[in-house]
Image (cartoon, rainbow, N blue to C red):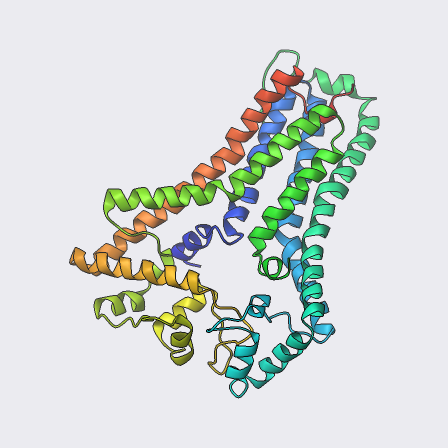
Amino acid sequence: MSLVNIISAIGNNSSIYPLIVRDCGIEVPSKVVMTYNQNLKDSKQMAYNATRERLIDEYGTSIVWLGGIPLMDKIGDWGIKKLGYSPKVNPNLFKENSKQGLNLNIEKFKNLAPEEVKQMEKVLKNKSTYQKLLATKFVLSTAIPVAIMGYFLPKFNFALTDKIRKKQETVKPVLDTVNTQNGENVSFKGLSAALANMSTVHKMALTDGGLTVGRVGTARNKYEKMEMGFKMSMMMFLNFVAPIWLAKGLDSLSGKLFNTNVNLDPNLLNNKDFLKAVKEDALELPKENIIEFLDKKPDSQFAKLTQKYCGVKYLKNGVRDPREFVDESKISKFQQEIEKFAKQAKESGNIDKFAKKALKVKSANILANVGISSFLLAAALPKVTFMLRKKVTGSDAEPGLVRN
């Protein structure tokens, strides 16, 4: 995987890749170290217990959070297929308009994609059943991960701590006399259509809300409940809202400072065929009807770009998949960004040089976004949480581990 591909992946806030980088690569290790050092101010035993709980909590949650939803979606799709329906039929097509819809697509594609049309006809005859199946799939893909992360994992974690604590009681004096009496700080080593069309990231944001409720509900005392509520709410904001704001702000600022449109994906800015088409004025774009253009010119460069960046899907025979909903608004915005980039690139006098500049600026913005949001999650938020904990409870120890 090239460097540009990596930057493109972590810069896509609609995918899980930025979350993987921030959560598993930066945030969790940093939180573990900070948790150890913070609780060490109370005692070494407290530090050990808090760190173990944090490791199980953070990495256990990450595994379920990042992998649970896709896994449950696959299981849901398998169940829908077993019942004789195709989960690929998009319920947005239930709303008919002059360009797309179940009835319109069935009539339009009956000779071009007969197998897919049969699947659509079955859904059309059994709308209510199909909608219930999609709703069930959505509930399974969100409720089960929420239950595991919000209730079962913390209960298991707390039970494990209680079990280990009983053994620690006999050696507590030994643990607390090592490197703590002299005050030294030991560093740590070691709704049918809306629901069905929710992206994995949107479902993760929703499960985060359920996770917050679960963690607050299973907390061991009022101070742990307060801390969990604050911490989890801020994590949701910093994971799902702040990076989008940062991306827009950085790209807007770059446009003003460098007079360079950086709203396109790094992979596209590095695409030689795309740049060649811009140079030669050979990139054919829709004039009015986007869907008609995609159907008539599936082999066009723009149609191929919409597959990669706008979710348009084609069958193996080159026919657009009639089961899929075409997001014309998204494609229209994408087209406008291409036109804006092409105009600025031509006016610059050197399209290749302009594209390289745009790629560097866009890459810098993405890396800055990841760096800033990771810092806020991995360092700033824990520090603020520790400060509030000390102010409210008067202790540096994890509130759930303090015996009342």
In this image, 233 relative to 311: left or right? right
Q: Quadrant of residue 77?
A: bottom right
In this image, 343 relative to 29: left or right? left
Residue at x 71% of width, y 15% of height? 177
In this image, 387 relative to 320: left or right? right
Residue at the far bottom in the pictured view: 111
> Which of these two is toward me, 51 or 304?
304
Q: Quadrant of residue 84?
A: bottom right
Q: Position of residue 78 (x, y in %)?
A: 70, 68
Residue at x 68% of width, y 74% of height? 85
Is residue 186 visible in the rendered image? The answer is: no
In this image, 166 relative to 9: left or right? right
Which quadrant is the C terminus positioned in? top right
79 to 118, vertically: above or below: above
Residue at the far left in the pictured view: 349
Which quadrant is the N terminus positioned in? bottom left
Q: How many marks?
A: 0
> Which of these two is toward me, 63 or 100?
100
Q: Position of residue 143 (x, y in %)?
A: 71, 51
Is residue 257 visible in the rendered image? The answer is: yes
Q: Quadrant of residue 267?
A: bottom left
280 to 402, vertically: above or below: below
Q: Position of residue 113 (x, y in %)?
A: 54, 83
> Which of these two is toward me, 72 or 80?
80
Q: Position of residue 26 (x, y in %)?
A: 52, 40
79 to 9, vertically: above or below: below
